[in-house]
Amino acid sequence: MSDQITLQTKLSYGLGALGKDFACAPIYIFLMFYFTDVAGLSAAFVGTIFLAARIVDAVTDPMMGVIVDNTRSKFGKFRPWIVIGTLLNAVVLVGLFSTHMFEGTTLYIYAAAAYILWGLTYTIMDIPYWSLIPALSSSRQEREKLVVWPRLFASLAWFITGTYGLHIVGKLGDGDQGQGFFNVAMLIAVLFVMSAFLIARNVKEKSAPANAKPAERFSFKDVMVIIGKNDQLKALIGTVLSFQIANLLVGGFAIYYFSYALGNADLFPVYMMVAGIAEVAGVFLFPRIASVLPRKHLWVIACGFPVLSCITLLIMGFIAPGNAILIGIAGAAIKFGVGIANALQTVMLADVVDYGEHKTGRRSESVIFSVQTMLVKFAGAAGGFIVGMGLSVVGYVPNVEQSDSTIMGLHFMMVGLPAILMTVSALVYKRYYHLHEGFDQDQAGKETQTNVATAEA
């Protein structure tokens, strides 16, 4: 496998992430708000379907990894599924933001079905997309350079969505939020499909060496063995899951926090704009930061910035409620850390693929990377479930002034809980994750031979 990745491949892969995350960001930033305040669903119901959908994903995501790893075609095993998944997910995305057109029992049934379908179809595309990384280069340095491109473009998609999303919805809907969300979904679907075909045309997995072993086929039982024997994958799951739940919890709660706890919805785009710029900066600077600081400290640093953000919001709540400068600092702190973490976790997963091959004797990019898709979606669902149930517990009522106890609850959900989860993520990483400098297959082989020789002696 050639280690060098061309600029065309990097750019096309990055633009693919732009379209992919334009389709994903509105789900995690606005879907709870759309369901509760536009479509009229109860917050508790929305939180429940978010969680139920992820239970489905716990089975279907690894299954999709198996399907991709077992795919044999002249276009490779990744690109066909990227195109198929994108086409399906684009249709479902438009349907999902049609929920406000229904009423009564039909509304609830349609919302649940549409959201579960969104998760299933997103899986078809997302798993092969990220699984491409180990197939494009075996060099850790090249992988670190490559992941900057999709993470940078993905951060740009989240920045535009968070900062200008509601404004664009208002413009395209001419004041009707339901119609605005529908029109935005239509626009995103077109961009999404275009980006998938760009990947299919320009991003091609490298051919295996002539002396390479034939690709193995996987069963669902194999998946359980692969995950069970890979202790570093399990460590990564605990590390990333707690981090992303905190991250997406903040993202899901922000619009409620600024609209009701601070009483100024106009602060939401300010927060998201600064946060988006900081996330792009975190991703962009990742290769340079990774070259200066040991990777064993990077994740802890990435967790530290969001904790600083929560502390800033807490201080602001006591001494300067609604202060735009402090809100900007808080937004920058959390998303700079998220930018570093998002780039780092992708590199870590590629290392875990190499480590898993050493442990099990089987290479399974799609199975391992299916865990990333499942983690992001489960984190979003857990965050959504907590938001939905939290809103119900604290007595939230849409479109009215909230009580003091409700506002206090909103503060805790936005500040306290995310800080706790980020701390847990850092502790799990420090205690259980050990592939800080990647995984060297040759060095591991030498160590194994040495251990065998020592045992025989």
Image (spheres, rainbow, N blue to C red):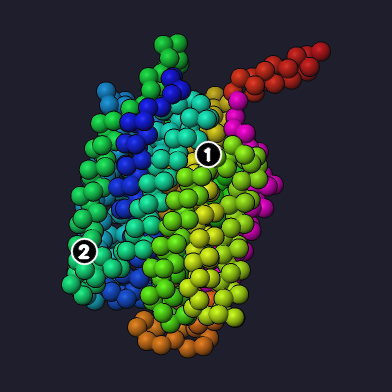
Against 318, residue 137 (above or below) is above
Residue at the (54%, 24%) spot, across then down: 361
View extreme (front): residue: 325
Cα separation, mark 1 vs mark 2, equals: 38 Å
Q: Which of marks 1 and 2 is nearer the N terminus?
A: 2
Residue closest to the eye, 278 or 116: 278
View extreme (top): residue: 211
Q: Is residue 157 magenta?
A: no
Residue 141 in sight from this viewpoint: yes
In the drawing, does residue 166 fall left or right of residue 454? Answer: left
In percent of width and height, residue 228 lies at 57, 39
Near mark 1 (Cα within 10 A), the count class, few <14, some 14-19 or many ≥20, is some
Circle 1: residue type: Pro
Assign a secondary structure to mark 2. helix
Residue that label 1 marks: 287
Residue at the (30%, 39%) spot, across then down: 82
Residue closest to the eye, 420 or 150: 150
Q: In which quarter of the image is the N terminus?
A: top left
Residue that label 2 marks: 182
In percent of width and height, residue 433 lies at 64, 42
Task: Between label 1 and label 2, give the one nearer the viewer.
Answer: 1
Residue 224 in sight from this viewpoint: no
- Mark sitting on residue 402: none
Against 271, residue 242 (above or below) is above
Against 23, residue 406 (above or below) is below
Residue closest to the eye, 352 or 4: 4
Assign a secondary structure to mark 1. helix
Residue at the (27%, 73%) spot, across then down: 39
Quadrant in the rendering for residue 25: bottom left
Span colored in magenta: 413-440
